[in-house]
Amino acid sequence: MTNISPSTEPVSEPRQGPVPAAPEAARRRPVSGWRAILPRWSPKLGVGLGLVTAIALFGILGPMVVGDPAAINNVGLTPPGGGHLLGTTQTGQDVFAQLAYATRGSLQVGLLVGVMATALSALFGIIGGYVGGAVDEVFSLFSNVMLVIPGLPLVIVISAFVPAAQRGAWMIAIVLAITGWAASSRVLRAQTLSLRNRDYVAASRVAGEKPWRVVSVEILPNLLPVLASQFVFAVIFAILSEAGLSFLGLGASNSSTLGTMLYYAQNGFALQLEAWWWFVPPGAVIALFGCGLSLINFSIDEIINPKLRTEPRKRAASRSAAA
Amino acid sequence: MSYYGRKFAFYLVALWAAVTLNFFIPRLLPGNPVDILMAKLQQRGGSVDPSVRRTYELLLGSDSDESLWSQYLSYWNNMAHGDLGISVSAFPAKVSDVIAQSLPWTIVLVGIATLISFALGVALGIVVGWRRGSWLDSLVPATTVLAAVPYFWLALILVALFSSALHWFPLLGGYDVRLSPGWSWEFISSAAYYGVLPALTIVISSIGGWLLGMRNMMVSTASEDYILTAQAKGLRPGRIMMRYAARNAVLPSVAGFAISLGFVVSGAIVTEQVFSYPGIGSKLLQAVQNNDYALMQGIFLVITVAVLGANLIVDLLYGVIDPRTRARR
Amino acid sequence: MTTNTTAADARRARPGPVLTVEHLDVIYQVAAPVHAVRDVSLTLGRGEILGLAGESGCGKTTLAYAINRLHRPPAEVTAGSVTFHDRDGHDLDLLALKNEELRRFRWVKLSMVFQGAMNALNPVTSVRAQLDDVLTTHVPSMSRRARRARCAELFDLVGVDPGRLDSYPHELSGGMRQRVMIAMALLLDPQVMIMDEPTTALDVVVQRGILREILRLREELGFAVIFITHDLPLLLELSDRIAIMLEGEIVELASADEIYQRPQHPYTRKLLDAFPSLTGDRGAFIRSGASSSREPLPGSQPETVDPR
């Protein structure tokens, strides 16, 4: 008599369950409607985008307008003022100029590693998740092992074995990418698995669509938010790791990043000499950039998991539900 | 295979992978580490003992005709016997001794800091996630700033603030060097005092992750059917929050402990550098700076084993708190 | 603890309905507000089974939740009243109760059985713990032994082996989980039980068993039931009265017999016609959906199935 099958949707789908979703939710069915995947405007998103854009512009355009970061003056360690916006290092170099170049350097590394790591994690995660079977077992075992082996020690060991002369930006980027893709691939795999089992994918497979078409038309668009979010994580991870490496003196030689600035600051006894203008700005830039990216990630999160959203409500005085 | 069996097997595989990685890295990268090491050894007055050279070759690779496979087997043999070579930077100490001396410091620091961070982060996450829409929600973006802050930079700031400026805490070290290490109360309290800033650094940096994860899960869980049932049953809100919501929401945090522990360990290494804390992290860096490859490899191995061990314990714990995993397959 | 009141006893104890809903309005306050429940009025007699039928999205679940104040933002009750006529003589205005009073009222006087029981039970605690929860919260004076006895008694009542009390929800079959939900709902001997599609997720045979249990328990214990489902024929067998909901309004409210024999509202007729008949000529089960008369087709006799 009755033939309604129980809802077996995974959590991320808006449920048409006991609490009927508001009308907008009906539009959030995961179809190829691009509007459904773009983040909704909110203050968090605004601040995040603002921070990221500001710092990115600083890194891209800054080096064109500031002075020469390597120019040595005889003034020694001076606090901000007198022509130097952020003071000078102990060799009289302009901190602000250094900051601009260092930001660019960090952003380059971040972007490079972000792309490579995301590509790797997409390869292992999505393909493993979609194909299934032995391939999936092997891929996921591999990524779990890579995940569980601690990253920074591994990177340190690898970097240390490479003689300093050959430790270029590319080498560091590759090492970071190799050690950083595992966490994302797990997330992507989980998401691919849940998407693969959805009705519309099954429908297109039954209709005889080729696998690559199924992946690119049905699965990838719905993976985009997750991919974007993982890319953002990868960039944050890259910038932080690279900074850590450089701080330890193991970074790319001949490159200038926010991490190397901190390394020189540490070696120049900036702490003991209370030269806050030297070691505070680089870390602050990293923190703000990372914060901006995280805020953007929040908005992306709200697309992936609609329950995190707070629906805009009209405030009306009436008897509301008990807590 | 049961859940526990599978977990054990996995960690064995991971351990094997780590050791094998350790074996291959020096061999794959350019350079001849053994010669460099032997030269350093001689500088320090060590002898060119064939057995010492042999150990190094097993660790780092050599030009000899010995097959890779037999090298690999002998390498495992050495590992099993705990022979990790002689440290060059701490000559004439054995690598295993150097590690044994510095490991406890790191374990205590990282262990305690992680526990505090996890407990606090989860507890705050529960409260923030449960009371949605309150002012607490605005805390959440703030913690993302913290999560994006580089550990070592935060350490620098804390040191600058609490050490140089306010003189509340010592600048560096693990304990007052005038005291001799031992189990005396004096020593332990000194160690605790010196450990506050490093621990604080780790806690502040990692708490954001736990908080956010827990909060997101609480929000997700709050709309689950069994929460509705609990409310309909007229249970007290506190009970629903803990027994029904938090109890379910904490599961992914525990499951994701692996990833977080890796970050904490990484952060600890750098933090130790900033504070010159006598743990295994600073020894690693010391080794790197001195081209003490044997010590480096040994430390990497020990760190990995420790992390794997911790993850195994947590995974087993997960099997206990989530009854559904025990039933799977 | 069981007062063993029969349905007849209940009606005699205090005459009049046990629950009165008057002109209830529930609106989802989102950007384009949705009027989910419009001006709904109904009464629930003591020991009566009232069926609430309608298609998905008609508001029947929203109504049920609003009665117990389980509705979540952005849903809001904007008008109307819900009055509970306790058998000890008091009248409670449910919408005006304070949080703590409401919490004490829930489950003791009015309990619920939820849909599917798929996810309605806490997956990480044992079934016993979830039944115990109710007892320790509402009857703190009960001893451990008394609680164990009560839980076992109820499992017997609904037909589940008390040995399964220590199982986890995922270890039970769908039918068993549903029975556990019913047992849980009966723990405190409520006067009203609201059942939201309790058998929708189950196969037909199991469904039958559960419905028989509900009828038997109603006879034995005397509680009233609001039974929500989209399955009208099921209600025809089960309920005393049926309310048909369409787009937030109750369009027809009459006894089961009346609904079946003489449906007034066109939507009611449409609903009745939408369900294929098991009897009649080959091919006769294919309905056009057009409102047909309730007269039997030539050559076939619509059987009145005995509800018991």
Image (cartoon, rainbow, N blue to C red):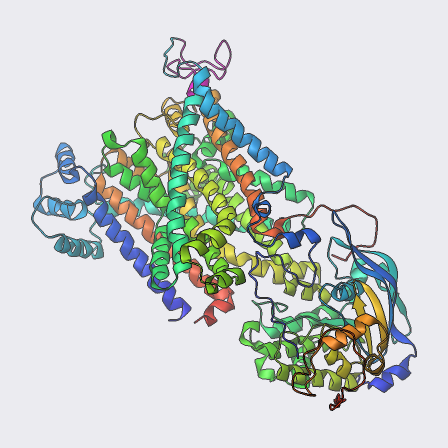
Instruction: Indicate the position of residue B261 as horizontal and vertical percent values.
Output: 42, 49
Residue drawn at point x = 30 percent, y = 56 percent:
B15
The image quarter in which residue C40 lies: bottom right
Q: For the point 71% across and 66% down, which residue is it?
A: C56
Judging depth in this view, the residue of C221 and C249 nearest the camera is: C249
Task: Name the magenta segment's main secondary structure.
Answer: loop
Instruction: State which quadrant residue A67 falls in.
Output: top left
**Which of the 4 image quarters holds residue A11?**
bottom right
A249 to the left or right of A21:
left
Q: Which image quarter holds the C terminus of chain C?
A: bottom right
Magenta span covers which residues? A75-99
Magenta includes A141?
no
Say left or right for C246 vs B289.
right
Q: Nearer the viewer, residue A105 or C138?
A: A105
Q: Position of residue B160 (x, y in %)?
A: 48, 27
Q: Is residue B200 visible?
A: yes
B64 to the left or right of A75? left
**Going 29% across and 31% down the picture, which residue do you hit?**
A168
Location of residue C123 in the rendering, given as x and y in whole percent from the top left corner: 57, 67
Q: Residue at x 23, y 45 (%)?
A: B25
- Quadrant of the image for the N terminus of chain C? bottom right
As rendered, which of B264 and A258 lies closer to the eye?
A258
* Residue that sits furthest to the front in the current view: C298
